[in-house]
Image: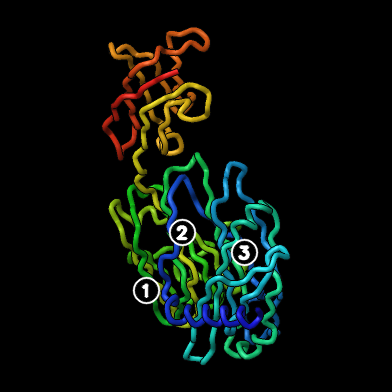
Amino acid sequence: MKLLRLFSILFGFLFSQLNAQDVALYSQHYGTIDFTFAGNTLNKMFNNLNTPCEINTSSSATLNLNEEDELLHAYLYWAGSGTGDFDVKLNETEITAERSFDFYLNTVNLEFFSAFADVTSLVKQQGNGIYTFSDFDLNSVIPAYCPTGTNFGGWALLLIYKNSNLPLNQINVYDGLQGVPNALSISLNNLNVVETDGAKVGFIAWEGDVAIAVSETLTFNNNVVSNPPLNPENNAFNGTNSITGGTDLYNMDLDIYSIEELVNIGDTLAEISLTSGQDFVMINTVVTKLNTKPEPPVIFNAISDNGDGKNDVFIITGLRDVFKDFELKIFNRYGHLVWEGNNNTPDWDGSSINGIGKDKVPPGTYFYTLKLNSIHYPEPYAGYVYYTD
């Protein structure tokens, strides 16, 4: 069993070398969703050739989603100097890498790695609070990296969550392991920009140094991105955390930038470029959030009000969480309005606005108009629904 597991890890590592180096689309998500990061470094300080070469074997970070946020996905990334440690712990739960990536820095003949595991079930179970990443010991590896100041280790959680108060968004997750110096370009495909409001891009990156800013630029669609004073134009990857505002994320970055002004409606592609004349930086994960076009609702045409839990109301799927300003009207065959509702009223169950108490309309065929009040679907829907008790 142990031999089989070792073979599986080695096969995954070799597979990642051959097929998963370039940062490329990993997963795509739609809904009233957003993303954030949590994580921490294992370094005790920024790399410096005059400081002791030491590294921690564990560190902690706090997850604090809002009460109305519903976690959908939690992806764990970890990285460090060397060829890889693929068995770690998160809150004392054993985690084994599902995918891995490596990077070879030929100027100093040294290797680096990153790893991935889906920890959604664990984070859903434990919820908000402190997360401790442990059993990650690079102490036997890093001495060979200290002379070049490239010794590091760290971990990050990418969290995708749902909130009904958000607009409909598309979130794309791209991952791999690419680095500089001196320059790299990352192409982001499968984008669907419908509106630019709230557009943002996030990075999980490793090994950036705050003290090195030689010819360092980060651009999105040929425009320099920055978030001063946390991330200046000439030193984007400098050991900072956009979520907490922290500046002590030694040799790793969890950065998020607005790109509202850098994308256009109709865009399906984007280009990220990074240059560095000295600082060694590796990009592990890129995440984009963009407003997107909602799928049209699916309208059923029968109500069977017999209390069996099946079709007891007028069912329209993909409506309430997406088209929050909809207006629905029900008419009888003579064109008289018998019921109207919106996102603040229950689904139609045959009740009549002219009835008293629980009075219902007689069985028969009724007609509806549904206005979505959406720029994407300006024309109202119209059709019939059959009601029987």
Percent x, y of residue 329? 36, 21
**Residue at left offset 70%, top offset 58%:** 130
> Dot 3 corresponds to which residue?
39
Quadrant holding the N terminus: bottom right
User: Which numbered disc, 1 or 3, marks the residue that appears first in the sequence?
Assistant: 3
Percent x, y of residue 281? 50, 77
Q: Say if mark 2 contacts mark 1, CB within 8 Å.
A: no
Residue 90 in which image quadrant: bottom right
> Can residue 245 be seen in the rendering of this structure?
no
Q: Nearer the viewer, residue 350 or 130?
A: 350
Q: Nearer the viewer, residue 345 or 261?
A: 345
Q: Amino acid at mark 1?
A: Ser
* Vertical side of 255 occupied by 14: above or below: below
Q: Nearer the viewer, residue 245 or 177?
A: 177
> Can residue 247 be seen in the rendering of this structure?
yes
User: Which numbered disc, 3 or 2, marks the residue that appears first in the sequence?
Assistant: 3
Could you tell whether 231 is left or right of 130 in the image?
Answer: left
> Dot 1 corresponds to which residue?
185
Say what secondary structure mark 2 lies in: strand
**Residue at left offset 50%, top offset 77%:** 101
Determine the CA span between mark 1 and mark 3: 25 Å
Counting the numbered discs, the total is: 3
Judge the density around disc 3: few (<14), some (14-19), many (≥20) Cα neighbours within 10 Å: many
**Comparing marks 2 and 1, which lies closer to the viewer?**
1
> Dot 2 corresponds to which residue?
257
